[in-house]
Image (spheres, rainbow, N blue to C red):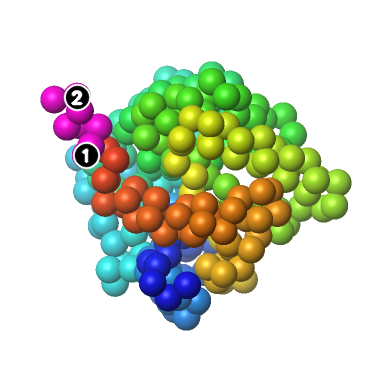
Amino acid sequence: MPTFKFFDLNVHAYPETEVPVEELIRVARRYGYAGIAITNYDEVVKGKEGEQLPPSIANFAFRGVEIRAKSVSELKRRIRLYYGKVPLIVVRGGSKELNEAALKNPMVDVFAPPHGEHGKEGLSHVLVRYAAENDVAIEFNLNAIIHSRRSDRARILGKMREILKFVRKYKAMPVITSNAHSIYDLRAPREMVALASLFGMQKEEAVHALSDIPEGILEKKWKKRREVEII
């Protein structure tokens, strides 16, 4: 698949993990990626009012943030805090109210659903429709499959199949990520595409979710289109 530019939009690095960004860049480049997004949890990033965070490292690792909130008001405050300061805002799913608030917010770039996690709400067709309307991409975290046990894996794959069905129905944007917390969590694009077939994603869909869609998210392609439509 040499004609595509591949991106992994959910990678975690130091200081959240022990692995330096430079090490992740080295491995990701070797695997053939055009770029990765370092989306450390916002508790680690700790953005401040008025502070502009560096957008990228070596024109390869893009700065992002993954937000985990306990209430809708906290979520909205944190989104506003980081909006415009980093190229990528990811929101980790939680309660039904949090999920709805995230997917109705066009300032969010990627929504990371709790794929089969106990005690967490999944995605309904209504929520995926909100994602499509607000150009919020839906993440399919492949490490959730790799690091799960047999019974849990079956449940997670079932949830992913269900979400994929809604994504197709409402023409929402899927993105495939590794959610890597070490160099050993990173997967080559070919392997990512193959893993995506486990929950029913076709090869063309998977390549699109690993190339054109994430590149467009980083370039704010759909957000710009949305601004034009509003004007």
Q: Are marks 2 and 1 in contact (CB under 8 Å)?
A: no
Residue 215: quadrant of the picture:
bottom left
Q: CA distance from mark 2 to mark 1?
A: 10 Å
Which quarter of the figure is the C terminus placed in? top left
* Image mark for residue 230: 2
10 Å crowding of disc 1: few (<14), some (14-19), many (20+): few
Which residue position is annotated with label 1?
224
Give the amino acid at mark 1: Lys
Numbered disc 2: secondary structure: helix
Q: Position of residue 8 (x, y in %)?
A: 46, 60
Can you say whether 50 is above or below 123 in the image?
Answer: below
171 lies left or right of 57: right
> Which residue occupies 49% across, 49% down?
175
> Which residue occupies 47% across, 80% down?
30
Name the foreground residue: 80 vs 142: 142
Q: Earlier in the sequence, mark 2 or mark 1?
A: 1
Name the foreground residue: 72 vs 151: 151
Q: Residue furthest right?
A: 151
Please indicate, yes or no, whether residue 224 appears anywhere in the rendered image.
yes
Query: What's the magenta region?
Result: 224-231
> Which residue occupies 29% across, 72% down?
58
